[in-house]
Amino acid sequence: MKKTVFIAFLFFSISSLFAQHIKESTMDSLVQKSLSTFNVPGIAVGIVKDNQVIFAKGYGIADLNKTNKVYATTNFGIASNSKAFTTSALAMLVDQGKLNWDDRVQKYIPEFKMYNDYVSENFTIRDLLTHRSGLGLGAGDLMIWPDGHDFTPKDIIHNIQYLKPTSPFRTKYDYDNLLYIIAGEVLEKVSGQSWQNFVQDQIFTPLGMNRSAPNWKLLRDKEDVISPHVPIAGKNQVSSRYTNTILDAAGGIYSNVNDLNKWMIFHLNNGDNNGKQLISEKQLKELTTAQTIMPVQTVAPYYSLFRSYGLGFRLTDIAGKLEVSHTGGLEGIVTQIIMLPQLKLGIVVLTNQQEGAAFNAISNSIKDFYLGIPDQHWITTYEKSNALTVEHADQITQKTWQIVEDNKKTKHQHDQDIQGRYMDNWLGEVSIRLKNGKLTFASKRSPQLTGELFYYKDNTYVVKWHNRFMYADAFIYFNILGNNKVEFTMKPISPLTDFSFDFQDLNFKKQTNNGTN
């Protein structure tokens, strides 16, 4: 009798286990509704569970100008989800005894300098990867954003010393891209391979990520790939693709849900790849160990009690389970990878429009299914919160441009004073000139930063960039000191401007004919 009951119980348990996977019809409904609600052209979703691929499918359109479809094979720029590939590559070098996480950066890059001698001399590999440098959010990103233009990793290594801290060293989380680029340079010096070749040879090839590439230029199949899209006046338009290789170690990889499912299984399987340990369990644990504390809100339905950054991953607890995740964003692309190790669950959502609400609504809904949390109606929740956020931002920008419009007929005594050539220590030269009757701002090293200046009030102007995909119009605050001495600082107008437009870190000084200020 007991044996019969046990067998029946075992059969029921196994049947329940197989019944616990989310249905394709449920996924179809969820993603299709997200596409329409959040105005996203194309989305791809992957799910792995217990070392098996449960789901891999594309939806919608890859490029609105071509109307080609998104498939599970379709490549997306995964942006900052590339950071975990950089830390995983470094973990391999730690396993090989070629470096330690707490080695000082100057051991490998002697010319590396930060904002003071103590920080410069004590800055470690771990510090490069954990967003606790003391620099502000996105500090120096205008060297790589919106397109990086002619800046090189060597420029970044030299110029980072000019960025001023906003908090004491190792005390506060502020996201940083430049330091991951420098981490890529460390990897190259230690391994003797380029970052691109190392990631290809040591990660992509062993894992069978055959359609992935370290950057756009190395991507073999440029047909089955999305284009980035940006909504202009509510209508999606194909925007220019980021192709500069300077960003590779921080955000350059192109991949797809088929390949990223393999990546998640590798991590959820503790670094084992078909019986071969590519990264030791010890070093994988280091990647997902809290390094830098992040702010957390303890709210339903997840009731998270902590949030932190590891090495290339964000960490938190949701409904009592560890969540290991990251997001990524480029102009017209946002992506997300989530792993719940205790459930052996992995979720990847890739989108070709910069609306993060879509991937959050999808990934949260999938998580809730496997956590047994009742339907939270995430699409509706994000739709409402997005509307409020956009409304608030629109009010700010509309008020700003209304003041500009009201002052258009006013003569501005400083129009002549502010014209000239200016220098910033790390971004370099910009000019403010009268061209065809319009006051124009132009950056020498970042040509996309070109636009028209309009008087706002007092000694403040606003610049309206010619590239309307950027959503980054900015205030310019002039300090007119007399004797042709003029300085200015900048600040984004809209709270929705991407943090990589770090105008607040700039400090321009007017140059005389002999190059002095």
Image (cartoon, rainbow, N blue to C red):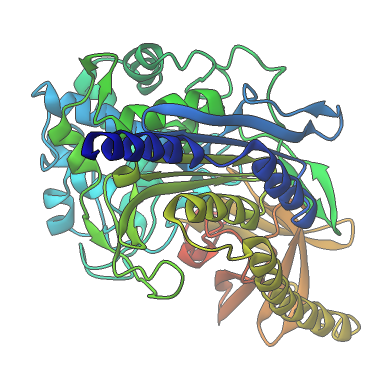
* Residue 166, horizontal then vertical, whole percent: 33, 70
Residue at figure coordinates x 38%, y 52% from the top left: 176
**If the image is split into quadrants, where does the N terminus sit?**
top left
Does residue 437 appear to the left or right of 238 in the view shown?
A: right
Q: Tell me if residue 155 can be seen.
A: no
- Residue 270 lies, with reference to residue 347, above or below; the image says above
Front in this rendered view, residue 28 or 488: 28
Residue at image point 36% right, 58% down: 163
Q: Quadrant of residue 488?
A: bottom right
Judged left or right of residue 248, residue 216 is right
Q: Which quarter of the picture shows residue 64? A: top right
Numbered label tally: 0
The residue furthest left is 97
Q: Is residue 187 left or right of residue 398?
A: left
Q: Residue at x 51, y 56 (%)?
A: 423
Residue 438 x %, y % = 85, 62
The quarter holding residue 248 reads top left
Residue 315 against residue 182 in the figure, above or below: below
Front residue of 444/201: it is 201
* Residue 431 appears in the figure: yes
Residue 138 position within the rendered picture, expressed as x and y whole percent measured from the top left: 45, 57
Q: Nearer the viewer, residue 402 or 509?
A: 402
Where's residue 133, x and y in %? 27, 57
The residue at 51%/65% (across/down) is: 509
Judge whether 466 appears above or below 378 on screen.
above
